[in-house]
Amino acid sequence: MSKQQLAKKFFRQIGSPGTIDEKVEKLAIEHLSYVNVQTDKALMNLAERLKPASIEELLWLIEADVSGRPPLPKGLPEIAKKIKERSKELGVYYQGPNPLITSSLLLQHSVLETGSRMDAIIKQAYVEQLKGSFSDVAGGISWVRSQTFKPLLNGRIIIDAGILPPSNKVGKLLEAAELAQIQGLFVDHNGALTWAKNWVDAQT
């Protein structure tokens, strides 16, 4: 039985209404997860899973839980105190993390143009943000630039290799090649040329 199913079963057992507030449900599911938080990555992922609840609200629940178990002293366990301090430093104490890298930011910094490539980078950037690969916009932009696509094919290569003569077909081939490279259909120069020849053959 999943954590979510256990939480719902508990709510039924105590006679809660049929519809449980999403915040309450998330807090119930994650109320013991804090004991395994040892890294920034784990803390960021906890803050993400808690949405729309927050670390602040989770700590309220932890304190209430601990304080209601005499003879234990009232207050937060030491690990929860560390989570409180670190989550404030990471900016995820009052609300879960928001993506630092957005389309408007990438356009503002002229890093990428709008399209499927940008969408893929933004999704991966958020994964890396939750891993702790970067924690601010400057770090995020640096990460994106490190991932910036470097094409293996260009018009001169296509023409010099005799794959196509100068024409508008070269541009169409390069557009298709960019997507193919992003998808991992080739990873080196020879593979790129082989893919390009096959693409031309498929068009005829």
Image (cartoon, helix red, strand yellow):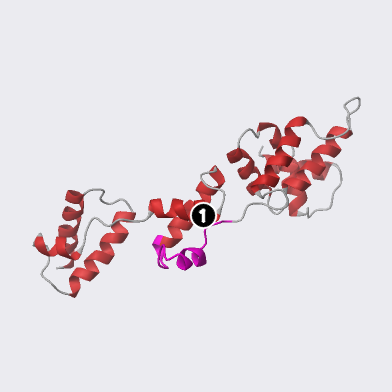
In the image, is 80 to the left or to the right of 131? right
Of all residues shown, which one is farthest toward the bottom?
A: 168
Quarter holding the N terminus is top right
Residue 40 magenta: no
Give the residue pinned by disc 1: 138
Q: Viewer-proximal residue, 191 or 101?
A: 101
Q: Position of residue 146 (x, y in %)?
A: 39, 51
Q: Position of residue 64 (x, y in %)?
A: 86, 39
Question: In the structure shown, which secondary structural element does the residue marked by tag 1 occupy?
Answer: helix
Quarter holding the C terminus is bottom left
In the image, is 128 to the left or to the right of 20? left
Q: Which region shows up in magenta?
A: 99-117
Give me the residue at 72% from left, 42% from top.
29
Give me the residue at 29% from left, 57% from top.
180
The local crowd at label 1, few if under 14, some if 14 to 19, many if 20 or more residues have their Cα within 10 Å, is few
Q: Viewer-proximal residue, 185 or 124?
A: 124
Classify residue 192 by image quadrant. bottom left
In the image, is 99 to the left or to the right of 9? left
Residue 84 appears anywhere in the view: yes
Above or below — where is 28 with respect to 196?
A: above
Above or below — where is 179 with respect to 147?
A: below
Q: Viewer-proximal residue, 124 or 132?
A: 132
Of all residues shown, which one is farthest toward the right?
A: 70
Q: Viewer-proximal residue, 204 or 49?
A: 49
In the image, is 109 to the left or to the right of 68? left
Residue 201 appears anywhere in the view: no
Q: Position of residue 11 (x, y in %)?
A: 81, 45
Amino acid type, label 1? Ala
Give me the residue at 65% from left, 43% from top.
46
